[in-house]
Image: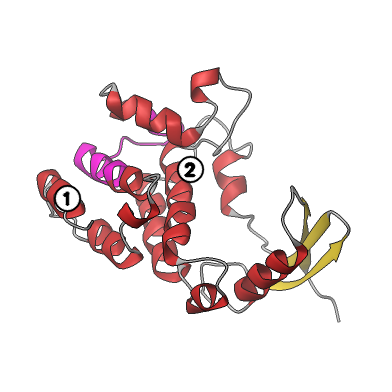
């Protein structure tokens, strides 16, 4: 019998062993068709190892940041489907009940993924100029300078709809508010992303009534 699986090696930067185990065990109970299942883990000193199901076709990180050529195979439609599908399967009740993570922190982490999908950039990239190293800070700066169209992944095979892009970016920026209590809940995010006919103005008004 041949089993296919893959390893992910991590180095701990001060994360307590107990906290790591609680979070990993919570992740291990999450079941969703768009998420690779965590099979096992190992803690050895300052090193952590995660064992996942093997994915024949690669993972999202490889498709976004790997060597895919000048034109990405991930069209805007595919990216939106990934975002919507991941949103619905992202928050697991086990996370909150463990007391280590909550829905607001999940929202922040999830939206970093949205930003990666929109821009094709890594969350932190030290190969870029200083003002572009941090994805969140760079995106805020670009939106503040009214350069929204320039944040879209240049490898996209087609231009995305301007209104849809602005709406998605606005929702994303609201979700990384430094004040966790001001971030919308995952249910609100789903509502914003699914209503394609919702006007950009309505999104602004809706988001800023959630606090």
State the residue in front, 145 or 57. 145
Q: Is residue 53 above or below residue 139?
A: below
Q: Is residue 32 above or below residue 134?
A: below
Per the image, the residue denoted by label 1 is 203
Q: Which image quarter: residue 126? A: top right
Q: Position of residue 210 (x, y in %)?
A: 21, 58
Q: Position of residue 11 (x, y in %)?
A: 79, 49
Distance, label 2 to label 1, CA atoms, is 21 Å
**Magenta stretch?**
150-170
Q: Is residue 96 above or below residue 118?
A: below
Could you tell whether 27 is left or right of 93 in the image?
Answer: right
**Image quadrant containing the N terminus:** bottom right
Q: Are marks 2 and 1 in contact (CB under 8 Å)?
A: no
Per the image, the residue denoted by label 2 is 116
Q: Position of residue 194 (x, y in %)?
A: 24, 61
Could you tell whether 180 is left or right of 130 in the image?
Answer: left
Numbered disc in front, either 2 or 1 = 1
Residue 154 visible from this viewpoint? no
Residue that appears at 48% across and 49% down:
113
Mark 1: few/some/many CA within 10 Å (<14, 14-19, 20+): some
Residue that appears at 44% across and 52% down:
108
């Amino acid at each position: 019998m041949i089993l296919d699986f893959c390893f992910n090696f991590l180095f701990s930067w001060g994360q307590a062993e107990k906290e790591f185990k609680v979070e990993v065990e919570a992740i291990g109970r999450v079941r969703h068709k768009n998420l690779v299942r965590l099979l096992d883990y190992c803690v050895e000193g300052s090193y952590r190892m995660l064992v996942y199901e093997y994915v024949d076709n690669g993972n999202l990180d490889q498709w976004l940041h790997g060597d895919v050529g000048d034109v990405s195979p991930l069209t805007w439609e595919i990216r939106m489907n990934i975002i919507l599908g991941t949103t619905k399967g992202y928050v697991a009740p086990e996370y909150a009940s463990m007391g280590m993570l909550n829905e607001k922190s999940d929202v922040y982490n999830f939206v970093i993924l949205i930003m990666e999908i929109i821009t094709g950039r890594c969350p932190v990239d030290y190969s870029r100029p200083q003002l572009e190293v941090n994805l969140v800070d760079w995106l805020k700066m670009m939106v503040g300078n009214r350069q929204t169209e320039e944040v879209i992944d240049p490898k996209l095979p087609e231009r995305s709809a301007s209104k849809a892009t602005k709406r998605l970016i606005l929702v994303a920026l609201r979700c990384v508010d430094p004040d966790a209590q001001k971030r919308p809940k995952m249910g609100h995010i789903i509502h914003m992303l699914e209503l394609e006919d919702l006007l950009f103005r309505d999104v602004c008004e809706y988001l800023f009534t959630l606090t």
